[in-house]
Every structure is written in C-alpha cells, then in structure tokens.
Amino acid sequence: MYFLPAERLRLYRNFKSIEVNDFHGLIRFYEQHEDGIRALDFDEYLDCTLSYTNALFEAGDHGKHLVMCDHLLELVIMQNVGPWDGEDLYHRLLFKKSASLYQLQEFDKSVRILREIIKIYPQDHLAALYLNKALLLQKPHWLYRARAAFVAFALLSVVVIALEILAVPRFFPDLLQPMQISRNLLIALSLASLSLGEAGHALRCWLKTRRFVRQARRNKETSFK
C-alpha cells in the first residue's frame, strides 16, 4: 500500500503526539496503523517502533516485546545503526530482552544474554546486578535438598516438643533433659540447614558473577592492546 508523503507525515505526527507514558495508547495506535508506520522513512519507522517496543515492555506484554526486540536487533545490525538519542541502541535492546526473559522466568536464557552483554560491555554494573539476581533464582538441586532437610528437622522438633509436653514428664521423667537437648539440637539443625543453604547459594552466585565480570574486563583490556 502506497502512502503519500503528507499522509506519512500526519501519521508520524499523530503517533508522536501520544504521551510517552501512555503505553497502551502507543500500542493501540501502532498496531492499528502498522502498515502506514512501515511505509515511513527509516529513522521515523525506527523511532516509532522503538517507542512501541518500549511500551510493550512497560505494559508487561513481554512475549510481544521479545519478538520486537529480535526484529529491532536484526535491524540495528543490518542497517549498522549507531548511537540513538545518545545511547548504544544494541546494548539497550539486548538488556531489555534479558529483562523480559527475566520477567517471564526464563532465567537460563536471561543469564546467557546478560553474559553476552557483560562480554561486550564489561563496565555495565546493572547487567552484572541482574546476572547475579538471575543466578540467584536458578535454584540448584542441593539447595532443594537443604530446604527439605530444614522441613524434616523442623517436623522432628515438633514431634519431640509434643512428646516433651505430653508424654515424657508423666511416663519417662528421666528422659526430660535428653529430650530438651534433642529438641534444641533439631531446631538448630533445621535453622542451620536453611540459612547455610541460602547463604551458600547467594555467595556462590556472587562469586560466579564477580569472576565472570573480572574475566570480561581482562579480555576487553587485552583486545585493546
């Protein structure tokens, strides 16, 4: 479909007149006039499509946002788009893609993209922060076992407390002190299994992120020598 220059200008002007925070309005307009927007000059098309893609992210439509991120990343590479509004557009799109994957709880994919970002931009502290957060949400099997141990020790301590209150003082008074020691030990073990498991996982993720960032920085420095 051919659009006259005046029609294209009007379309672009109408799109730009929408408030930047009216995400649903931007989405509706773009999807209603997508054919016309595709007929715009490249810079105008890219401007509208970036606004639409950002609106999808802010509106929580992360599935569509991922599709548009892939389209824009391909466009940026093919057209060799440089800085846009003073920002590295490739970097921005990659990060937003990883954020959408994070929101969709696809943590493995999010981690892979965040690692690629850090390899290219090792000074990106926000990417390192999100990498650590995504790693934290990837629960290893041993952590689930630690949580199971917490539940098991807690249940055993409840049983011991019940016996200590209901049966031991009346039928086995000599066992009262050993039961109290057992109860305290089980409570300590339950708390230790949970706290040590969670702390160990957090420390492991922090160390992995720190090592990865340091290696990426060394590689970047080496490549410039």
Image (cartoon, helix red, strand yellow):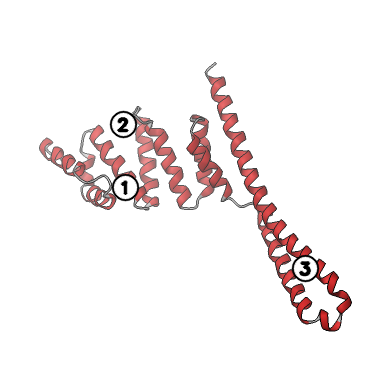
- Specify the amino acid type for callout 3: Arg
The quadrant the C terminus occupies is top right
Near mark 1 (Cα within 10 A), the count class, few <14, some 14-19 or many ≥20, is many
Image mark count? 3
Can you tell which quarter of the image residue 177 is in? Answer: bottom right
Place of residue 20 in the rendered image (x, y in percent of width and height, measured from the top left):
26, 44
Badge nearest the viewer, 1 or 3: 3
Place of residue 14 in the rendered image (x, y in percent of width and height, measured from the top left):
16, 44
What residue is pinned by disc 3?
Answer: 183
Place of residue 91 in the rendered image (x, y in percent of width and height, measured from the top left):
42, 34
Which of the marked residues, 1 or 3, is nearer the chain's N terminus?
A: 1
What residue is pinned by disc 2?
Answer: 85
Is 81 situated above or below 113? above
Residue 49 relative to residue 33: left or right: right
Badge nearest the viewer, 2 or 3: 3
- Specify the amino acid type for callout 2: Asp
User: Is residue 157 or residue 96 the one in the foreground?
Assistant: 157
What residue is pinned by disc 1?
Answer: 55
Near mark 3 (Cα within 10 A), the count class, few <14, some 14-19 or many ≥20, is many
Q: Secondary structure at mark 1?
A: helix
Place of residue 31 in the rendered image (x, y in percent of width and height, measured from the top left):
25, 50
Which of the marked residues, 2 or 3, is nearer the chain's N terminus?
A: 2
Near mark 2 (Cα within 10 A), the count class, few <14, some 14-19 or many ≥20, is few
Residue 117 relative to residue 49: left or right: right
Q: Secondary structure at mark 2?
A: loop
